[in-house]
Image (tube, helix red, strand yellow):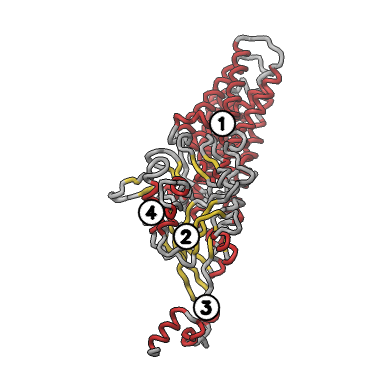
Amino acid sequence: MHPAISIIVFSTFSGVGFGIGFWLGILGNGNQSPIVVITGLIALVWASVGLISSVFHLRRPTRAIRAFSQWRSSWLSREGILAILTLGCIFLYIVIRLFNIHVPGVLVLTLIISLLSLATVYATAMIYTQLKAVPAWNTVLTPLVFIGFSLLGGGAFCFSFLPEFLSREFEFIILILLVGGWVIWILWSLRRDRIGMGTSSVETATQLGKLGTVKPFEPPHMGPNYLTREMGYQLPKSKSTQLRGLAVALGLIIPIILYCIVFVYQDSGFANVSRILLFCFVFSGIFISRWLFFAESRHTTMLYYRNEH
Amino acid sequence: MTSLPKTTERKLGLVIDLDVCVGCHACVTNCKAWNTSGYGAPLADESPYGNDPSGVWLNRIHSFETEQNDMSALVHFPKSCLHCDDAPCVTVCPTGASYKRVSDGIVLVDESKCMGCGLCAWACPYGAREMDPVAGVMKKCTLCVDRIYNENLPEEDREPACVRTCPTNARFFGDLSDPASEVSQLVANRESVDLMPEQGTSPVNQYLLPIERYGTDELASPDFNLASLANRKSGGILSWVDNLLNGK
């Protein structure tokens, strides 16, 4: 699939934003410092950048408002509604904390923020997971990858830039999320290599199997078309291996080293720089992995166009 | 609403005879000609006379080579929207632009609602939907909805442009829910198939597989006697040639 930058920015930035939203809901009430308000604002910014980026993928962005209408059947519609609801709840919570308004049910509101944040990321993942035509995406591992990286991205951001918010007792969570998130992604990648076109093949696509082996002889036109540009993206195997290695190195291995430095050289300048670098590396790893999520996944339409297995 | 109807009153669709199609692209051309001036936005072309021409087509013909026992065959394979009963392109649409009609089962796009996100094209396993680069909305086969009910046209023209133009009669149009219709009869009497049944889309359009005339095993056999094909009992063109050469 064509790795469109607008969609990669959409899912990675909103993932981090709603990841921060999740941790805001979990840890917000236990923290009396004004850092909670700043954390909430940062969550809003990340998620909004992602959502605005998704609009750039539309050919008719002025009609985007219609996308909220089909929640009964469409995951894209559900994602839009959940995102707006989550942003609204985070905004409400920020106002309550900023003006120290004493209202009952704040605890419920924070719980709702966490749940909605998770639900939004799940809905984002389901936009891709639901597509049987892309067998690499059509697995329960896809929402797990999206949710894992969202919690990791949000948690790592708090660890790096808002240490006052992510209190010391919770810093160990970063290590769990780091390892957990990347293990799920590696499992997803290994499944992708194995699944190929799933149960579809040129024989099922043409049903000509009874005439023997089938292979595409001539495409409909000499040049590329919308379908081959959108769904025919091909990443050479060698490049895929390199980029996977790069994603794991940047997103997992270097952050683990930085994490250790932060704890060995507590509160020194070296530790503080390492702390900030941790999120930068984690996010660049997630970004490359999301690029690969699109670039490596293949669509059954290409069975009609070229030799695919 | 982009929820699919439980049932449709009719199932209008195409039956495509792979035994007959010669891959002439007349259906492709007439489809483009009709639909660029018919329902909805014109089907745009990008740099049609430049180095890298590209355009939107609602019907495309692929060709496949099959091989068995050193015998190969070329099969021309027209492909357009299959108007699936369980169309995944419809349910993914967030704006309500995509829908399947209850009255005749045609899958359509309301171009005034489409925001051009492209998700429906991703959802279609067959590649039946193409984004118009100029109008910025999704285009797909409408089964020539502006022909088949069009009372301004002579009755014989009230069928999809591709069917009307096919010079070899490889394409048929009709109601596949009516067992008495010509298309249902073809499906019943020939080996007909759904494309990619494993995708669970329940396509309405049916493909008739090439008829096996001589077993490939038989042809590949070293003992095979080519002259036996001219056996007068076999009829058809070979016996005609035989009769001609024998001066009968």
Q: Answer with mark 3 or mark 2, whichever residue precedes in sequence.
A: 2
Quadrant containing the C terminus of chain B in the rendered view: bottom left
- In the rendered view, does B167 fall on the left or right side of A179? left
Q: Do tags 3 and 1 sit on the same chain?
A: no
State whether residue A36 is above or below residue B148.
above
The residue that disc 3 covers is: B214
Secondary structure of residue under mark 3:
loop
- Counting other residues with Cα less than 10 Å from the Cα at mark 2, is it few (<14), some (14-19), or many (20 or more)? many
Q: Which amino acid does label 3 sit on?
A: Tyr
From the image, state whether disc 3 or disc 2 is nearer to you.
Answer: 2
Q: Position of residue A31 (x, y in %)?
A: 66, 17
Q: What residue type is labelled 1?
A: Ser
Subunit bearing disc 4? B
Give the Cα separation between the discs numbered 3 and 1.
Answer: 56 Å
* Residue under the point 37% across and 39% down: B134
The residue that disc 2 covers is: B171
Q: Do tags 3 and 2 sit on the same chain?
A: yes
The residue that disc 1 covers is: A69
Q: What residue type is labelled 2?
A: Arg
Give the Cα separation between the discs numbered 3 and 2.
Answer: 24 Å
* Residue under the point 39% across and 44% down: B38
